[in-house]
Amino acid sequence: MLLQDICQFLEAKFPLQLQESYDNAGLIYGHKTQEIDSALISLDVTEAIVDEAIAQQCKLIIAHHPIVFKGLKKLNGKSYVERVVERCIQNGIALYAIHTNLDNHDLGVNAKIAAKIGLENCRILRPMTGLLHKLEVYVPQSHFTEVDQAILQAGAGQIGAYKDCHFRTAGTGTFTPSEGANPHIGQIAMREEVEEFKLEYVVEAHLLAPVLKAMTSAHPYEEVAYHILQTHNRHQNRGAGMIGKLAEPMDTRAFLTKIKHTFGCGCIKHTAIVKDHIQTVALCGGAGSFLLPDAIGAKADIYISSDFKYHEFFDADQQLLIADIGHYESEQFTSELLAEQLTEKFPNFAVRLTKLNTNPVNYL
Ligand SMILES: [Zn+2]
């Protein structure tokens, strides 16, 4: 199989457009036409992980955290980042990162954490805006079905759990073909009037290019009249963090003990216990203190995340319980999620989970 088959599958499922502006997800090293038969999955890429890939004869490492996060100006082995990249190049091992685009997806990192905790009725804690566009296109009524089907099949018209959505209005389109035009309807220098439909669709950002391509190839006109408008709508299935409920309220201390066990935490740093029981749980894998106001606003009993600074613990302000379970601990099941996705799609492709724990933090 080619490396591009893996990249295309992952990016169709978890589009790169979902990544945060500071991120560097995607193919970091490697050539898309490279042949591969296995991948090593890990949370981080360290020198030990590269050695594991060499020993397993894996020519691809898929990691959650991008090893190259900012510009590399020299490659002389002074930092572990430089040594990792150098060793991958020397051994022909491709590096792929699937980071905040996996965080910002309702089937991504946080869905896996929620499943491990046993949460129900989960939704995104802070839905993203700017992802949804509106496409308006004008089409002669005689060709409406072909154009509509092409646009829908390319992925437009999806709103939550509904597909094939559009709105249409009938009207009259007018135009005068100029010298050099090759009109489907009408003649040069004669003003034409055609009964048309205006069709309107919601389109996700990453689907705009294929939708426009399908639309223009199915449309009979030489020049297609259309508009793309960016909406301020929130995308309910894309964004940061997640919130859900336990089937039954649980004693707070018992719940914390369960979390400690499930995630194998050396310790949980938490704020004062202000409620006896926990039922509504907000969470965010990795560094998630930025979502604390959303967790409070959503009336969560507890917010599980990591990398809280001292002063940020005060912001719980008796309204909920902050539980900092550790960055690695919170995201460790991401490798399992990726392995499941790849194995389901490519049953003959060898997906190996790393046997190493890359957590740089130890607890005495
Ligand atoms: Zn992380």
Image: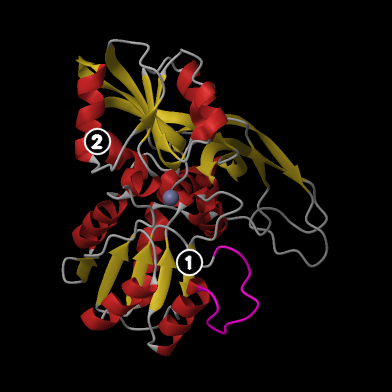
**From this viewpoint, which residue is outermost toward the bottom?**
90
Which contiguous range is marked in magenta? 69-79
Quadrant containing the N terminus is: bottom left
Image quarter for residue 281? top left
Indicate the amino acid at tag 2: Lys
Residue 118 in sight: no
Q: Does residue 156 lie above or below 253 as drawn?
A: below
Residue visible at 40% across and 65% down in the picture: 8
Q: In the rendered image, which residue does mark 1 sit on?
A: 67
Indicate the amino acid at tag 1: Ile
Residue 142 in sight: yes
Q: Position of residue 50 (x, y in %)?
A: 34, 76
Q: Does residue 108 lie above or below 64 as drawn?
A: above
* SS category of the residue bearing label 2: helix
Q: Position of residue 301 (x, y in %)?
A: 36, 17
* SS category of the residue bearing label 1: loop
Q: Position of residue 52 (x, y in %)?
A: 27, 76
Q: Marks 1 and 2, Cα distance to the nearest angstrom? A: 28 Å
Q: Nearer the viewer, residue 236 or 185?
A: 236
Which colour style is shown?
Answer: secondary structure
Residue visible at 35% across and 56% down in the picture: 359
Residue visible at 31% across and 79% down in the picture: 51
Q: Do tag 1 and tag 2 residues touch (Cβ < 8 Å)?
A: no
**From this viewpoint, which residue is outermost toward the front?**
364
Q: Does residue 275 lie above or below 110 as drawn?
A: above
Depth check, mark 1 against mark 2: the one in front is 2
The numbered mark, 1 or 2, whose residue comes first in the sequence reads: 1
Image quarter for residue 340? bottom left
Q: In the rendered image, which residue does mark 2 sit on?
A: 260
Looking at the rendered structure, which numbered label has been put on residue 238? none
